[in-house]
């Protein structure tokens, strides 16, 4: 009898603890260790395609300086404003092509490279308060212009002023402190690029069919979803935090100009181009008519003769998707729960590519854990920026493949804790903004609210299994 | 009768150009102003706004004077970088469009692309002369281009000079391009200063100043078509080598100033750059191994001196 009472008391206390949240047994196990589970070429490619990938990978790592005059920074066109000096600087975790590097990486623990970049080569930049050694690589966007009209554009963190290779240039950094004080700046972190060829090769019809296939379940849970589309041809755009970019080459071209300040054939006009800070003709990156290795031959391989942007796009196109860890009982249960509570309604587990001219990439079934559609994420995550059809609180469903080895989560990298990232899907207390536009939904306005309620209704053990599952991806 | 009238008009026009006092040389007032503007000292060749300001002011005051425009263009080409040169061309293209019937502005636009797209400049100038064979400034511009190394044509140069001097006997044909500044001696000075136990921060600052001067010098070469692609590549390679010298000196200066962390950090960056260049068989790597080996050897000696038996 006494034992029975003791058991009952213990059970009651445990239940109370769970209900009041005083004990949270579930926790993010952290980024998965071991070798990087991504970064190689798509496995079925032929040798010549793999060679192109390898050469494009080198180009992805090319470090840019203003005029290519600094040894080890041989790329041309950095600035006048910039956030990084190479693609691989920001797309680095767990391997080149990934997301933001960081000190907590089991694969390559490094501080945020933007800190050192601020003063590289005698540059005179002040490091904004939101860039820290242990934080994520970030870009900054201003929500509004001075006159209150929408801005939404990226404002380069740094300028080339003071650098040894930018003699005579005098350009001030944006006033980030003022923008922060006015609650007028939002951040974005780098999106991983692994396996994106599969995404580009997925036909619009496949994405549309996937979105409508679960419409009744979604409706019951208050989930909608719509695609961002090209204003030119009406097809689905699918890259970037708000699915604002149509293709990998557009994605690469935009990033090259916006993040590194390198004008190119897709974005041929230098940004922030005051005459005294422009050192190169435009575009700074272009198709090579003469082989750059010898400067005299009109022939060469595809990588050599192509622009940097084409190389970047093909590096992403030909990269393999992340390889998940072997399943365990916990991750298998987590996977089942991920589906049953509704996560997979947006984080679609399976899609299939259409025909492709790259070897072995046609009709491939892959597992991005995204529907590549836009969803309202509510006031807690809203960033107040509209891009195409994506409104202030709408984001593309973040693909979860590779999330097991990622260090920072959500569009602005506000957390390194997967559990917090999950809760933020329905968090009303965040610092987000939606420019006063109501979403028409209950609570915070996030389409994920009911699914997060389902998650919170799970036992700590089941929640842990979901976390373990996610970290296995 | 009509033919006589046309002939009269043509002769009047030719006489007007040849006999126009302002065509061959500036009015006395303008000449004085230009000479005065040219006396403003150039303390820092990279200070574009400061160096061009006197000519900019004259251009605003005398917007219709060709000599003022020409001198302004020369100043921009002397002190400007790619962005300034591009802006110059755009400005004169706009002016030519605004004054579409005015030969002077067409000429000034053509002149603004000399050295940038000289082949097009030749075409524009010859077009002007097809309309007005006695337009002396175009002959002078052509003589300058044909006299340059990159577009050398002795026969054409001679012809254009003859035409120019027949119209303007006292004309001066400038050398194109203007001579390049000599490579800066400051890096070498800094190295000597270091050997003479110079103050480390001064040594490093002098070396960096030299580097900046040579970066600026390269900007006199890169954006213009007076120089061959190979010469541009060679100039860039020479600048690469200078970076290794300056970094090396910086490391030594840090060590001498007991700023060991700064020295180690810079050395690490140098090693990373060297590894990157080596992996790509980049010619910019050639100076790196010897530089790094020397710095490491010196570090060993320095450590030995610090932790030695005495």
Image (cartoon, rainbow, N blue to C red):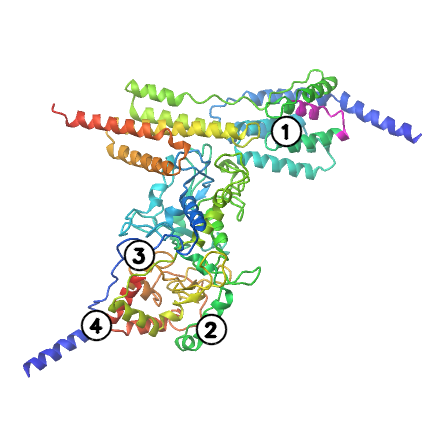
Q: Is residue A146 left or right of residue B164?
A: left
Q: Secondary structure at mark 2?
A: helix
User: Which is more N-terminal, label 2 or label 3?
Assistant: 2
Mark 1 Cα-neighbour bin, 10 Å: few <14, some 14–19, many ≥20:
many
- The magenta-colored residue range is B130-143
Q: Is residue B62 left or right of residue A335?
A: right
User: Which is more N-terminal, label 4 or label 2?
Assistant: 4
- Residue B223 in the image: x percent, y percent? 54, 32
**Residue at mark 3 shares a chain with residue at mark 4:** yes
- Residue A118 in the image: x percent, y percent? 37, 41
Q: Which mark is residue A405?
A: 3
Disc 1/disc 4 C-alpha distance (Å): 82 Å
Given contact means CB atoms under 8 Å apart, are the residues at marks 2 and 4 in contact? Answer: no
Q: Please tell me in which quadrant of the rendered image residue A436 appears.
A: bottom left
Disc 1/disc 2 C-alpha distance (Å): 67 Å
Chain that bears disc 3: A
Q: Which residue is mark 1?
A: B69
Asked whether residue B75 appears in the rendered view, the answer is: yes
Disc 3/disc 4 C-alpha distance (Å): 29 Å
Q: Which residue is mark 4?
A: A18
- Residue B117 in the image: x percent, y percent? 61, 33
Mark 2 Cα-neighbour bin, 10 Å: few <14, some 14–19, many ≥20:
few
Disc 2/disc 4 C-alpha distance (Å): 37 Å
Disc 3/disc 2 C-alpha distance (Å): 31 Å
Vertical side of A178 occupied by A293: above or below: above
Given contact means CB atoms under 8 Å apart, are the residues at marks 1 and 3 in contact? Answer: no
Q: Foreground residue, A214 or A146?
A: A214
Mark 4 Cα-neighbour bin, 10 Å: few <14, some 14–19, many ≥20:
some
């Amino acid at each position: 009898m006494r034992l029975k009472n003791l058991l009952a008391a213990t059970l009651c206390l445990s239940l109370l603890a769970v209900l009041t949240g005083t004990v949270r047994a579930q926790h993010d196990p952290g980024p998965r260790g071991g070798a990087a589970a991504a970064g190689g070429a798509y496995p079925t490619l032929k040798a010549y395609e793999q060679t192109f990938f390898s050469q494009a990978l080198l180009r992805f790592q090319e470090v840019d300086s203003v005029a290519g005059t600094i040894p080890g920074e041989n790329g041309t066109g950095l600035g006048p404003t910039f956030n990084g000096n190479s693609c691989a600087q920001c797309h680095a975790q767990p391997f080149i092509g990934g997301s933001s590097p960081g000190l907590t990486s089991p694969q390559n623990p490094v501080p945020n490279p933007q800190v050192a970049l601020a003063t590289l080569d005698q540059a005179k930049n002040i490091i904004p308060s939101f860039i820290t050694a242990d934080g994520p690589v970030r870009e900054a966007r201003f929500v509004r212009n001075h006159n209150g009209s929408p801005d939404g554009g990226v404002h380069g963190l740094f300028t080339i002023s003071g650098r040894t290779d930018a003699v005579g240039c005098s350009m001030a950094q944006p006033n980030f402190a003022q923008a922060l004080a006015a609650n007028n700046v939002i951040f974005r972190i780098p999106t991983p690029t692994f396996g994106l060829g599969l995404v580009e090769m997925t036909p619009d019809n496949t994405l549309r069919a996937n979105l409508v296939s679960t419409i009744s379940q979604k409706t019951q849970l208050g989930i909608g979803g719509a695609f961002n589309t090209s204003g030119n041809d009406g097809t689905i755009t699918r890259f970037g935090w708000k699915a604002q970019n149509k293709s990998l080459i557009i994605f690469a071209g935009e990033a090259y100009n916006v993040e590194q300040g390198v004008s190119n054939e897709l974005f041929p006009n230098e940004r922030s181009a005051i005459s005294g800070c422009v050192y190169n003709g435009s575009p700074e990156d272009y198709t090579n008519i003469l082989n750059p290795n010898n400067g005299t031959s009109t022939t060469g391989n595809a990588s050599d003769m192509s622009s940097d942007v084409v190389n970047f796009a093909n590096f992403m196109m030909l990269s393999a998707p992340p390889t998940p860890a072997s399943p365990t009982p916990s991750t298998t249960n987590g996977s089942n729960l991920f589906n049953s509570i509704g996560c997979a309604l947006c984080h679609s587990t399976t899609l299939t590519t259409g025909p492709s001219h790259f070897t072995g990439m046609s009709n491939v079934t892959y597992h991005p854990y995204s529907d590549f559609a836009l969803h309202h994420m509510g006031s807690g995550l809203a960033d107040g920026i509209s891009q195409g059809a994506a409104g202030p609180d709408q984001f593309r469903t973040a693909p979860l493949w590779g999330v097991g080895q990622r260090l920072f989560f959500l569009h602005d990298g506000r957390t390194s804790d997967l559990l917090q990232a999950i809760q933020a899907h329905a968090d009303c207390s965040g610092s987000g903004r939606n420019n006063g536009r109501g979403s028409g939904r209950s609570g915070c306005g996030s389409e994920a609210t009911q699914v997060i309620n389902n998650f919170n209704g799970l036992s700590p053990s089941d929640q842990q299994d979901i976390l373990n599952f996610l970290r296995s991806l | 009768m009509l033919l006589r009238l046309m002939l009269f008009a043509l002769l009047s026009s030719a006489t007007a150009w040849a006999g126009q006092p302002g065509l061959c040389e500036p009015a006395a007032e303008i000449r004085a102003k230009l000479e005065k503007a040219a006396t403003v000292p150039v303390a820092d060749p990279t200070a574009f706004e400061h160096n061009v300001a006197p000519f900019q002011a004259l251009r605003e005051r005398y917007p219709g004077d060709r000599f003022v425009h020409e001198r302004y263009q020369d100043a921009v080409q002397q002190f400007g970088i790619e962005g300034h040169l591009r802006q110059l061309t755009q400005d004169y293209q706009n002016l030519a469009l605004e004054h579409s019937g005015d030969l002077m502005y067409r000429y000034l636009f053509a002149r603004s692309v000399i050295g940038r797209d000289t082949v097009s400049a030749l075409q524009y100038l010859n077009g002007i002369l097809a309309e007005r064979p006695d337009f002396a400034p175009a002959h002078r511009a052509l003589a300058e281009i044909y006299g340059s190394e990159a577009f050398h044509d002795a026969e054409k140069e001679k012809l254009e000079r003859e035409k120019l001097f027949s119209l303007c006997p006292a004309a001066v044909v400038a050398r194109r391009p203007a001579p390049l500044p000599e490579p800066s001696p400051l890096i070498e000075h800094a190295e000597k200063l270091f050997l003479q136990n110079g103050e480390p921060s001064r040594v490093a600052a002098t070396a960096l100043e030299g580097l900046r001067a040579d970066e600026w010098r390269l900007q006199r070469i890169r954006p213009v078509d007076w120089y061959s692609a190979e010469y541009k590549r060679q100039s860039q390679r020479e600048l690469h080598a200078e970076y290794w010298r300056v970094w090396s000196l910086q490391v030594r200066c840090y060590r001498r100033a007991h700023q060991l962390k700064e020295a180690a950090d810079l050395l690490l960056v140098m090693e990373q750059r060297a590894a990157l260049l080596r992996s790509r068989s980049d010619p910019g790597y050639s100076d790196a191994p010897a530089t790094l080996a020397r710095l490491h050897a010196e570090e060993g000696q320095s450590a030995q001196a610090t932790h030695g038996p005495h």
